[in-house]
Amino acid sequence: MGRIVVEVMPKPEILDPQGKAVARALPRLGLDHFAGVRQGKRFELSVDGEVTGELLDAARRAAETALSNPVIEDVVGVYEVDEAAR
Amino acid sequence: MGRIVVEVMPKPEILDPQGKAVARALPRLGLDHFAGVRQGKRFELSVDGEVTGELLDAARRAAETALSNPVIEDVVGVYEVDEAAR
């Protein structure tokens, strides 16, 4: 069974209140190393059998329609998970 | 300016209602290629200057404390973004 990852992030010009909340919480935990935090989404689509080019195309269509809102979000990655490397 | 990505996914044994909702929506869009969908989170932590080993350690601590709930989520990746490759 193969897996395809889809990564979605808020567009740079879009305010990201979740990311801002995390960025403000980190220093209280002693983690003051970071200039900013953006929070997005990561999907894993599982497929029966191997990941083919056709399935990657379907994942890209899913990413642009169901998995992201193109007005406020960018799809920043669609790729096959290398199961052997995990 | 460097960036570190933190990837967080629901543990395999945890029900994932957001992922299930997406999985049920895809066939209605003509995308019936996928056996299942899991939805997690993707964070981008920006740092001033280069990403160092110390900063990656801090990001791992942030991932385990602030960015994930270890009862229901796994941190599946903490890595530097290769800005040149984007």
Image (spheres, coloured by chain):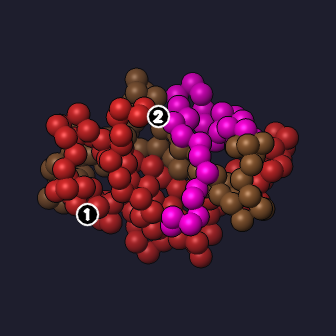
Chain colours: A brown, B red
Q: Give the quadrant of residue B47.
A: top left
**Chain name for mark 1:** B
Q: Is residue A22 left or right of residue A13?
A: left
Label 1: element kind: helix
What amino acid is labelled 1 in the image?
Arg
Q: Is residue A84 left or right of residue A32?
A: right
Q: Is residue A69 magenta?
A: yes
Q: Give the quadrant of residue B75.
A: bottom left
Q: Is residue A64 above or below residue B74?
A: above
**Chain name for mark 2:** A
The total of numbered circles placed on residues is 2
Q: CA distance from mark 1 to mark 2?
A: 24 Å
Would you name the residue on which mark 1 appears? B61
Q: Is residue A80 left or right of residue B29?
A: left
Residue B7 coordinates in the image, percent (x, y): 44, 55
Q: Is residue A33 left or right of residue B11?
A: left
Q: Nearer the viewer, residue B46 or A27?
A: B46
Q: Is residue A77 above or below residue B11?
A: above
Residue B26 coordinates in the image, percent (x, y): 77, 46
Residue B67 coordinates in the image, percent (x, y): 36, 58
Q: Nearer the viewer, residue A8 or A57?
A: A57
Q: Residues within 10 Å of mark 2 (few under 14, many from 20)?
A: many
Q: Is residue B10 magenta?
A: no
Q: Give the quadrant of residue A58.
A: top right
* Highlighted range, magenta: A57-86
Q: Residues within 10 Å of mark 1 (few under 14, many from 20)?
A: some
Label 2: element kind: strand
User: Is residue B25 visible in this depiction of the protein?
Assistant: no
Q: Is residue B7 above or below residue A72?
A: below
What amino acid is labelled 2 in the image?
Pro
Would you name the residue on which mark 2 appears? A10
